[in-house]
Amino acid sequence: MRIVIAGGHGQIALRLERLLAKRGDEVAGIIRRPEQAGDLLAAGAEPVVCDLESASVEDVARHMEGADAAVFAAGAGPGSGTARKETVDRGAAVLFADAAEATGVRRFLVVSSMGADREPPEGTDPVFATYLRAKGAADADVRARAGLDWTILRPGRLVNDPGTGLITLADATGRGEVSRDDVAATLVALLDEPGTVGRTLELISGDVPVEDAVRAVASH
């Protein structure tokens, strides 16, 4: 498969690129800064410099021609203010979905966030609340598109511990944490499983092997 990843230099994206390249897929990662290219090349991915905050649909679509799937894994990241949550976490996701539809790339995965489906609780940090609302708005936009075979993945609190390959994946899992390694492994399995199209799934660490968990979700 050829897979295009938005946010190609993100911590989950780099892990995903390594896994996909290792199994022989062709991977392109969209990055904002040319100096990030070396890390993508080291992961086995083709670096594509394109700023999703200023690009047009046509700009992005050019990089998606001939792809079999697209993964939105971009985020404004820690330290960014409310304005960039809106332009990246919502705006760039919508742009990426527009480009996928324009080029006929149907399989579309989104790395979202647990809690994006509801109004943040009172007392939530204002920037984080804006982030959750932006992710929720982006998810709603993608879910409304008939032209995409989408799956939305909402991991719990992300940690950098080594992956165990054991997860809990369900429509609702309850709160928990999950390693970025296991998020990347779950994305690979989701790409291969058409039975997860049209699903919004929560992910935390658990006791079921990744492929078994994805198969089980797809079967009901």
Image: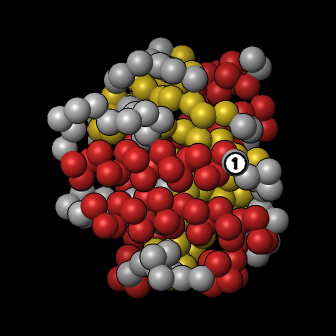
Which of 165 and 179 lies nearest the eye of the viewer? 179
Which of 105 and 45 lies nearest the eye of the viewer? 105
Vertical order, 77 against 140 (above or below):
below
- In percent of the image, x 24 and y 57: which residue is there? 78
Quarter of the C terminus within the rendering: top right
The x and y percentages for residue 215 are 71, 24
The x and y percentages for residue 122 are 23, 32
Q: Quadrant of residue 81?
A: bottom left
Vertical order, 181 against 75 (above or below):
above
Where is mark 1, residue-wise? 144
Kind of residue at disc 1: Ala
- In percent of the image, x 51 and y 67: which residue is there? 92
Is residue 41 visible to the viewer in this orientation of the structure? no
- In percent of the image, x 65 and y 27: which residue is there? 214
Vertical order, 204 against 35 (above or below):
above
Q: Disc count in the image? A: 1
Quarter of the N terminus within the rendering: bottom right
Q: Is residue 147 found left or right of 36 in the rendered image?
A: right
Q: Quadrant of residue 217?
A: top right
Q: How is the image coloured?
A: secondary structure
